[in-house]
Structure formats: structure tokens, C-alpha cells
Image (cartoon, helix red, strand yellow):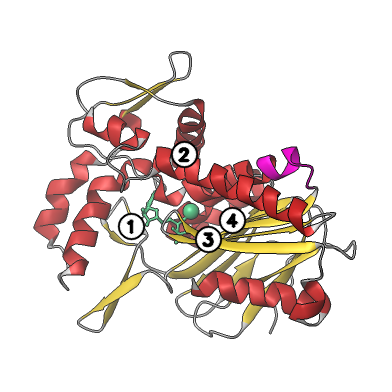
Amino acid sequence: MKRISLLLAALFLSAAGCVQQELSPKTVQKTESIMGTEVTVTVVARTAGEGEAAIDAAMTEIKRLDAMMSLYKDDSEITGVNLAAGKRPVRVSPEMIEVAAEAEKIARLSNGAFDVTIGPLVVLWQMGLKEGKVPTDEEIKRILPRVGYWNIVIDKKASTLFLKKPDMIMDFGGCAKGYAADKAAEVLRKQGIRNGIVAIAGDIRAMGRREDGRPWRIGVQHPRKENKTLTVLELSDKSVSTSGDYERFRIVKKKRYHHILDPRTGKPSQGMESVTVIGDRGAVIDPLTTALFILGPGKGMKMVKDLGCDAIFVDDRGRVAATEGIKIDR
Ligand code: ADP
Ligand code: MG
């Protein structure tokens, strides 16, 4: 995927001056295609064998979570919950409860800008745009009543999820990757790895430090200038997520339609080109980034600060807003 290869290119170029140096025997890296995107895991290990085994375990963890949370798999737990919408609660894994609870929290804090029950709208837009058609206002109006996070019942004790209305669809597309990056990093730690990076497209977990003892350097891509970074972050034991309109979109009649939908209008949200959030947990910042993409800095900045995170916003006029402490490249 473009964004991540650029990010990683920036990471390596800035990390040690050149790719060969960074990829010395102790720094091991692998890329696989999981969760419909590119997953790259980099570790600093004692030996290449140790590094590779740890990376394989991390990849297996991401595949396990994908099998649970993918909307596009008939036998995933989320599909089970969606098929039982309006009928009955469904018993799910503790991981599903955790992601749903974080998603619900961000939905509440963002006044529903982030909403995991966005599924019916996602399906409507995906089906339409695939054929080069934009859904009509009438079609959107018919779908909107099926969206509403307040109709999710999370029973932690019974470990069940229930969608109160029939035809509701939960979609973890905006929050599963950050959570999975956290969990994969936990698996790396159990394998004895202290230093590494898990990157699931734009959702990245940086553990410890580089081989040379310095923090990891992660370039944040400019949403419109392919080879330009907004800034290079120096991170250690932090998560970073980016949501943008520049990778997953379709052009219909010269207009760009991207994949982040505003639940208030039922249409692709307007006003922002990209949002990056830095925080302690991917499970929080992945949905937060999606929410902020919809809210923009005006409404979003306070939320970022209240949650103890940092953020960079780029609006559709190219204006950049960031929390104090983030240095923007000019
Ligand atoms: P990416 O998947 O490119 O990393 P995001 O994390 O912002 O970007 O997630 C976008 C995905 O989240 C969409 O593809 C869709 O599945 C889902 N989504 C779209 N709009 C919303 C929304 N308002 N609230 C929650 N999820 C959303
Ligand atoms: Mg997200």
C-alpha cells in the first residue's frame, strides 16, 4: 500500500541513512497481506531466526483477529452478530467485546461522528461506487435509521453483543487495525522482542527503540504531495494512526468519493484530507482518528487533548493544525 511503503521508506531512510545499514542482521522485517491491506512487522532481534519466528507469531495473531472481525468473511464473529441483528445476543470472544467497548466510547465522545454501526451505509456506497454510481439522497435517507451506536448492547459479563434493530451492520473497519497492532506487539513481547514496529496500513505500533538505541522515526505523508512528509515523528512505545481521503476513493463525474462516511449526512465527510493521531493505545487512536477526520480541528482538538493524545490535521485547503510539540515540515 502506498501510504505505508512511503512511511516505511521514510522510516528507513531517516533511520540510518540507507536501507542496507538499517537492515543489518539483527533488524528483521516481513510484509504480508492481511485485513485487506499490507502488514509490515519489523523487529530488532538477537538472531535472524529469532526475529523471523517472532514476526510469524505476530502475523498469526493479526490473522486470528481478522478472522474474528472481518465484515467480508461469512464465518467471522462480527458476521454472526450482524446476522442476529434484531433477533438475539451473540456470544463473542473477549477481544470483540474490547474493540466494541472502545468503539462505543469514541462514538459517545465524538457525538456519533465515529459509529461502528455505519455498516449499511458502507455497503450502499461500496456497491454504488463499484458501478460508478453515487447513491441518491432518497437511498441514503432510507438507510440512515439503521445506523446508531446507541442500539448496540454490550454485555461484558455474558460476553455477548446484540444489535437491537434488524438489518443493522457493525463494521470494525475503522477500529480493528489499531487494536490488532497493539495485540501483535503484545505477542512480539511474549516472544522476547522489546524493540520493533507493527504497521497495519496507517495503524502503527512502535515498541522500544531502533537497533542503535534511538527512537523509531516515522514519516507522516502529505495527503496531496506523494513524496513529501508533513513531519517525521520520533516514537518509542507509542501508537500512531492516519486516516486520509487519498488512498481509498473513487472519482465519479470528476468528484472524489472516499471511504470515511459522516453518519450525520450519510455521505463521505467533507473538509479534511488527513488526520494523524499519536497516543498510547492503537485501540483508542484508530477510531479517534476516523472521528477527527469527520469533526476537523475545530471540534476535534479538545477531544484529542482530553484523551492525552497528539494530532495533526490537514484540511481540504491544505491548512495544517497540530497539537503543541509537533513540528511541521514547511
Ligand atoms: P483506513 O481503513 O483507511 O485506515 P479508517 O481507520 O479511518 O481508515 O477507517 C475507515 C473505515 O471505517 C471505512 O472503510 C469503513 O469501513 C469504516 N467507517 C467509515 N466511516 C466510518 C464512521 N463514521 N465511523 C466508523 N467507521 C467508519
Ligand atoms: Mg481508524
Mark 3 burial class by Cα count in 10 Å: few <14, some 14-19, many 20+: few
Question: From the viewer's perspective, is 281 left or right of 92?
Answer: right
Q: Nearer the viewer, mark 3 or mark 1?
A: 3
Residue occupying the point 73% across, 37% down: 190
Question: From the viewer's perspective, is 119 left or right of 27?
Answer: left
Label 3 C-beta lies within 8 Å of the nearest ligand 1 atom: no
Q: Amino acid at mark 3?
A: Glu
Labels 1 and 2: the sequence-earlier one: 2
Span highlighted in magenta in the image: 187-193
The residue wearing badge 1 is 261
Query: Which quadrant, please, contains the C terminus?
Result: bottom right
Residue occupying the point 43% across, 14% down: 158
Question: From the viewer's perspective, is 35 left or right of 19?
Answer: left
Name the image quarter holding residue 172. Answer: top left
Mark-to-mark CA distance, 1 and 4: 20 Å
Provide the secondary structure element on which disc 4 rests. Answer: helix
Asked if the residue at tag 2 contacts the one at tag 1, i.e. Cβ–Cβ closer than 8 Å, the answer is no
